[in-house]
Image (spheres, helix red, strand yellow):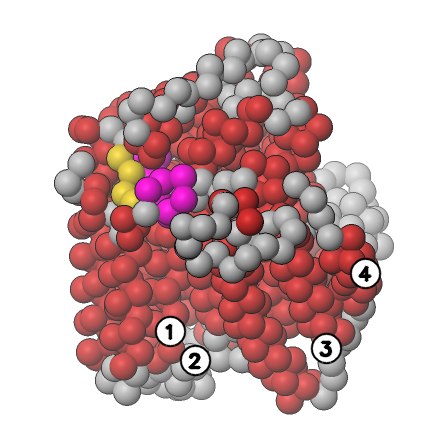
Amino acid sequence: MSINLTLLIVMGALYACGIYLILERSLTRVLLGLMLLANATNLLILATGGYAGLAPLFSKDIAAQDYNDPLPQALILTSIVISFAVTAFMLGIIYRTWVLARQDDIQDDVEDLRVAETPSFDAEDDAEVPAETSEFPLATVTAGAREMPAEDAAAEEQPGSLNVDPRPMEASPEGGGQ
Amino acid sequence: MNIAALAPLAVVLPILGAALTFLLIRHSRAQRAVSIALLSLTLALECLLLASAWESGTAAVTIGGWLPPWGIVMVVDQFSSLMLVVSSAVSLAVLVYATGQGMADGDQDAPVSIFHPTYLILVAGVSNAFLSGDLFNLYVGFEILLTASYVLMTLGGTGPRIRAGVTYVVVSVVSSVLFLIAIAMVYGATGTVNMADLAMKLGELDQGTRTLLHVMLLVAFGIKAAVFPLSFWLPDSYPTAPAPVTAVFAGLLTKVGVYAMVRTETLLFPGDALNTPLMVAALLTMVVGILGALAQSDVKRLLSFTLVSHIGYMVFGLAMSSAAGLAAAVFYVAHHITIQTSLFLVTGLIERRGGSSSVDRLGGLAKLSPLLALLFFVPAMNLAGIPPFSGFLGKVGLLQAGVELGTPLAYALVVGGVVTSLLTLLAVARVWNRAFWRRPTDAEHPDPVLLAAPAARVSGPGAKPNDTVTLLPRTMVGSTMGLVVIGVALTLFAGPLFELSGHAARDMLDRTPYIHAVLGDGSPVPAAPVVGGGR
């Protein structure tokens, strides 16, 4: 099988530009990058068919190897249709992002940021209140409900809780949150 | 043979349903009836296909009368028909759930009229991918289901869904491009895209080319299946979609990737060429996935991480390339589709009943709704692999196969599998303890719904801004219950199912039934590679 060098170079350039563009944060550039990648792949499929030959319309006088290979072209046609649909959908999404947020950027995941900002999962491990060793009230304190429940819990726990005698852990139904 | 000739209907019927429901877009009642009827019909047909594959073995259907090496074929074997039946049963349950949700909410939340056609096209894409005996048709099947999934993922076009949808679409398109590049390379190297034909011709290529093609295909499918280094996109994008959509994605879409990996490993590149990297990937998928789950407080995200983690079990079974391992993997796929989907459906119910899906805001649900607690408890224990359930049986099968293999890496995976199972138990027990077991007042940020007076809970003001909403519509609870019952039935009928998956695994490793069904009985099958040999 022989390959057309021009096609190969164009394909490489398209892949390079496409990969560069999909690494951008702007959605429109990402979309352009995806389109370039899809078209580079179409060229790759075309290249697998070898050199261009005659149109594959059967005639008894023509030797089989003179025809073009029709299969890659059929594959390309399918993949063009698919990338057309995906491009249209992406344009819709980009427009919707712009309507909602007036920006064209890929946004960070809210939950990811939250997990990343959480210093440690087991908040008890590095809590600032060392005097209290019973874990149940602390869990409510450190997990953020700082007003009423925390004070109640602290008041309840204060007598004799100076890191000496952690009260025996009762089989309490609210226990499992750690 | 005659029944197997109906295989294309498994794709055609849902597409027909999509066209009809699209025409009925203004008549939501008729739309619901048509889509449920056509999906039930598809399910019945696929049960027939499974029966015929069980009795008369693998069969191939040529589309349009073009003979196999050139035309497109659809192959019905035990694995593909089992996947079809399980996936259609699950999608039917989710469809009923979704219509229940739509009816209860009065369809204002999302444009549900577009839901039915899109959903049916998704089902058609999944069926096409399972049945395809042609690499390019497999790609088309993937694209059909992915394009439908883009629409479902961003249904309603709210901010979070669009944000998650962007990640999902870009990652999916990149994986599709990789798959297409792999197909082009395969075609350039062998001159065919028919999978049976490829099974014969790929063996003649030299080692380097074969490894390249093998890796390309596995990477493309690995992104779709969410195998560890390629799984980053899944927990970010799945949880924001509507509950039924997340459920069906979690159940089906990653499993289509696993299915394609199984075909690649058994039919196209038999032997153990890439078993070691696959095993390492499986181990990392299991452990990293479940550690991610432990860090989450949102139930949907937690379940998405367990989904990633349990993909590792399937890859483990696949990577052993022994009949026992593959059989256990097939069983595990069937089990996991059912269980993971029912857990996501239950989470949808939790969100309706408790007002949130974050365990920081939930509490006391066991007292509030014992039925909901039961519906969560059974599949959760099943997922964690607690003895009587099918999750336990599947894991035991995998671990036995791992011990049978006996290499140090296999033992590492056995240990990793047990640890992952225990950590899964920890993760779901945390949800159980916090959302169901403790008092609502103990929640860190208790949801107002939970603290409201009992009389105001059911439909009174203050429960939800929209006071006509039914918290637990009977259709939604019923379909979830049906799926949970199917999950329990997989435990009761684990014997026959294991026998079926054992047969399927032997047929796949043998390759002769597949190749003969597609290319005719006379075609010479290349010698089955020696397991342990360096192919």
Q: The residue under label 1 is which amino acid type?
A: Phe
- Where, by quadrant of the figure, is residue B39 drawn? bottom left
Q: Is residue A54 visible?
A: yes
Q: Position of residue B428 (x, y in %)?
A: 51, 45
Q: Is residue A149 visible?
A: no
Question: Which residue is under mark 3?
Answer: A28
Crowdedness near tag 2: few (<14), some (14–19) or many (≥20) residues, C-alpha within 10 Å? some
Q: Which mark is residue A12?
A: none
The boundaries of the magenta stretch are B67-82
**Lateral position of residue B518 relative to residue A23, left or right:** left
- Label 4 – label 1 distance at C-alpha: 40 Å
From the image, state whether disc 4 or disc 1 is nearer to you: 4
Please name whichever residue, B37 or B442, is drawn nearer the observer in this view of the structure. B37
Judge if badges 2 and 3 mark residues of a common chain.
no
Q: The residue under label 2 is which amino acid type?
A: Ala
Q: The residue under label 4 is which amino acid type?
A: Ala
Question: Which chain is home to disc 2?
Answer: B
Does the magenta-highlighted stretch encompass residue B36? no
Tell whether label 1 touches label 4 (CB within 8 Å).
no
- Label 1 – label 3 distance at C-alpha: 27 Å
Tell whether label 1 touches label 2 (CB within 8 Å).
yes
**Lateral position of residue B482 relative to residue B164, left or right:** left
From the image, state whether disc 2 or disc 1 is nearer to you: 1
Q: Which mark is residue B115?
A: 1
Q: Which mark is residue A13?
A: 4
- Where, by quadrant of the figure, is residue B16 drawn? bottom left
Q: Position of residue B469 (x, y in %)?
A: 34, 80
